[in-house]
Image (cartoon, rainbow, N blue to C red):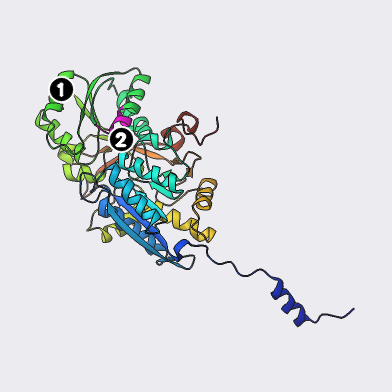
Amino acid sequence: MRKITAVGALILGMALAPPPATAQISGDVIKLGVLTDMSSLYSDINGPGAVAAVRMAIEDFGGMVAGKKIEIVQADVQNKADVAANISGRWYDVDGVDVIFGAGASSSSIAAMRVAGDKKRIFFAVDPASSDITGKLCNAYTVHWLYDTVALANGTGSAVVKAGGDSWFFLTADYAFGHALERDVSAIVKANGGKVLGGVRHPLNTSDFSSFMLQAQASKAKIVGLANAGGDTINSIKAAAEFGIVKGGQKLAGLLVFVSDVHSLTLNLAQGLQLTEAFYWDRTDESRAFAKRFATHHGGKMPTSIQAGFYTAAKHYLEQIKALNTDDADKVMARMKSTPADDPIFGKAVIRADGRKVHDVYLFEVKTPAESKGPWDYYKLVRTIPGDQAFRPMDQGECPLVKK
């Protein structure tokens, strides 16, 4: 038998070895789409700050992953379902966008996630709150990243009822988000022995809340629950002050309040509000470091929880591509649902089969002017709500992806 020399064996081994793995990246570029409210009532809580946050995530990778360039596109969703559907469809089909982060209001986000499901492309629902996104409307390509109406109900709603707020009147934004928030908080109120005395629904982006406040005042409910967000919440609280709602003995429950809302209102108006958030810039060393960096990208402003969510969602997505060497949507989603979604800002987390990201959330109270030590020092922690207590159990959401 002829001997094979060491050199010969090496050459033979090289010939038989599989070729080195190459990245399987569609379009030879990784394209991230930010579809959010850039100009209307939610633009302070997401908007340009969301775009800045995604750019920060791209910076963390040096602008490349798996040997391919990362690009970003952005658009104003206008909080309209038809706009969301049209842009997301074009981005996925024509422009080669791999993933969309957004998409403004719950109604526009639901439209975008439906397109993502049809196209089998990934959508991170960072902006919206409706718990239906991981409930009856869930699909295999959507991750609900930050918070939802169940977590808000289990946080603020539960705390207010247990503190004696056992009669409620709701001031509700008249679309998917407001309806879901009123529904989920009402369930918590009733489960804790409280009563819902009534409610009124207002159009999105309303400037005059006078008639709504008169109805809330006439209800004599202990709690006026604000099932709205952004500019609508700000205008609601201002109107409540004008009509003497709090001075008259009623209390406001801001069911979705962001640090940018408190900044706009000032502590004089916002003090004492209890609210539920998954992130506050001054909670930990890691959140403070992120906030300091974000401020350099966004005019000195502190990040809202949604803007922090855009950053971590984009970073998490890029980490999957780095690990897998592909942007194949099915492989990326499979890995996200089978490995931890921990990060330094939101802490330990998992992504469930229904697409719900589960992490701790926090009940905060807005400081008085005397308690605040400086700009953006607005919250004090009341309690931490573990993720498995904050979010709805997976088997109770009617998600068709979940086996009974």
Answer above or below: position of 248 versus 12: above
In the rendered image, which quarter contains the N terminus?
A: bottom right
Answer above or below: position of 143 versus 252: below
| Residue 103 in view of the camera | no
Residue 146 at x, y = what percent?
38, 43
Residue 177 is tagged as: 2
- Residue on which the image places disc 1: 215
Q: Looking at the picture, tell me which residue is in the foreground, 148 or 118.
A: 118
Please give the name of the residue rendered at 17% of the width and 45% of the height, measured from the top-left corner. 264
Tell me the SS state at disc 2. helix
Q: Looking at the picture, tell me which residue is in the foreground, 373 or 235.
A: 235
In which image quadrant can residue 56 be found?
bottom left
In the rendered image, which quarter contains the C terminus?
A: top right
Please provide the residue range marked out in magenta.
Answer: 174-182
Dot 2, crowdedness within 10 Å: few (<14), some or many (≥20)? many
> What whole-number distance in Å separates the C-alpha atoms at marks 2 and 1?
21 Å
* 265 on left or right of 279: left
Tell me the SS state at disc 1. helix
